[in-house]
Amino acid sequence: MTTTPRDTTPGAPEARQRVIGMLGGMSWESTAEYYRLANELVRDRLGGLHSARLVLSSVDFAEVEQLQVAGDWDRAGRLLAAEATRLETAGAELLVLCTNTMHRVADQVQAAVGIPLLHLADATAAAVQAASLSTVGLLGTAFTMEQAFYRDRLAGQGLRVLVPGADDRAAVHRVVYDELCRGVVREGSRQVYRQVIDRLVAAGAEGVVLGCTEIELLVGAADSPVPVFPTTRLHVEAAVAVALDGVPVG
C-alpha cells in the first residue's frame, strides 16, 4: 500500500483518528507486532511524531490456552467478550482481535459490544482477491487449520482453502505453541515450515495464508515459492485504514 504523508505543517488541518481497540495477549509475542505495526503505519501516513491512537487489553494466554485444549469455546468467548467491553468503555471505536485462532469466538465478542469488530479473515481474503488468486494454503494452529470457522470464512468469499496433512499440521501447531509463543525462533523449524509450504504448493496452492499471528515471526515471503499473506500485517493495515480514512468495516 503506497500512501503520501499528510501535511503536518503548522495550521494544516488534521483528520481525526478513530481509536483502535486491540484485544491481545494470545500470545503477547504477536500482540507486540500489532502494536509496533500500527504505530509505524500511522507514522508513515501522517509523518512527524504521529502515532496510533489505541487502547490495548492483554489477557493471560495460559488461561485461554487451557480453554482451547478443553474445547470450552463458550467460556473463552465470554472471557474475551468481557475484555472487549472494557476496551469499548475505555474509548475504543473499532475492535481488533489480535489472534487468528480466537476468531473462533468472534461473533460472541462482536455481540458484546456496540463498536465494529474488524474480522482478520476478511482482511486476509481481500488481500488474496486483490492478488487475483483463488486457491490458498492455510498455516495456523491445529484449531484454525482443522475447524471450520476460519476456512469457511475464506471459502465464503470465493476462495479454495487447502490445509497440510495430519503430520504437517501437528508440526506447525507444535512450533507455534512450544516455540513461537515463547519467543523462540529456530532455523530448524523454519526449514520444517518451508517443507510444509512446498507440499501445499505441490497440492495446488497459489499462495499461502500465514494464519497464525506468531508464524510471521518465523517465515515470510523469502521462504515460499508463491506469495504469502501475513495476516498480522494485513489486519493492522486494514485497521489503520478504518482509523484514518473512515473505511467501513464489513
Image (cartoon, grey):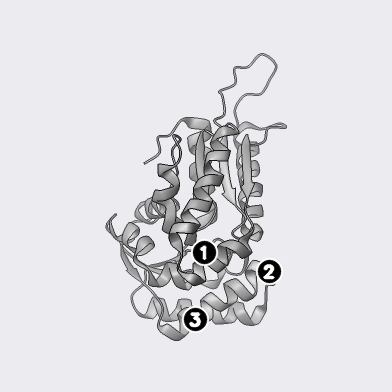
- Residue ID at (52%, 77%): 172
Amino acid beneath label 3? Ala
Q: Nearer the viewer, residue 155 or 86?
A: 86
Q: Secondary structure at mark 1?
A: loop
As drawn, is 248 to the left or to the right of 220? left
As drawn, is 232 to the left or to the right of 157? right
Residue 7: percent from left, percent from top: 62, 24
User: If you read the primary sequence from the N terminus, does the residue marked by circle 1 or circle 2 appear first?
Assistant: 2
Residue 54: percent from left, percent from top: 62, 37
Amino acid beneath label 2? Arg
Picture layout, residue 88 above or below residue 189: above
User: If you read the primary sequence from the N terminus, does the residue marked by circle 3 or circle 1 appear first?
Assistant: 3
Q: How many marks?
A: 3
User: Does residue 138 show up?
Assistant: no
Please report contact status of discs 1 and 2: CB closer than 8 Å, yes or no.
no
Q: Secondary structure at mark 2?
A: helix
Q: Nearer the viewer, residue 194 or 139?
A: 139
Amino acid beneath label 1? Cys
The residue under label 1 is 212
The residue under label 2 is 182
Please report contact status of discs 3 and 1: CB closer than 8 Å, yes or no.
no
User: If you read the primary sequence from the N terminus, does the residue marked by circle 2 or circle 3 appear first?
Assistant: 3
Residue 168: percent from left, percent from top: 47, 82
The residue under label 3 is 170
As drawn, is 185 to the left or to the right of 76? right
**Real-space Cα separation, disc 3 to disc 1, in angstroms:** 14 Å
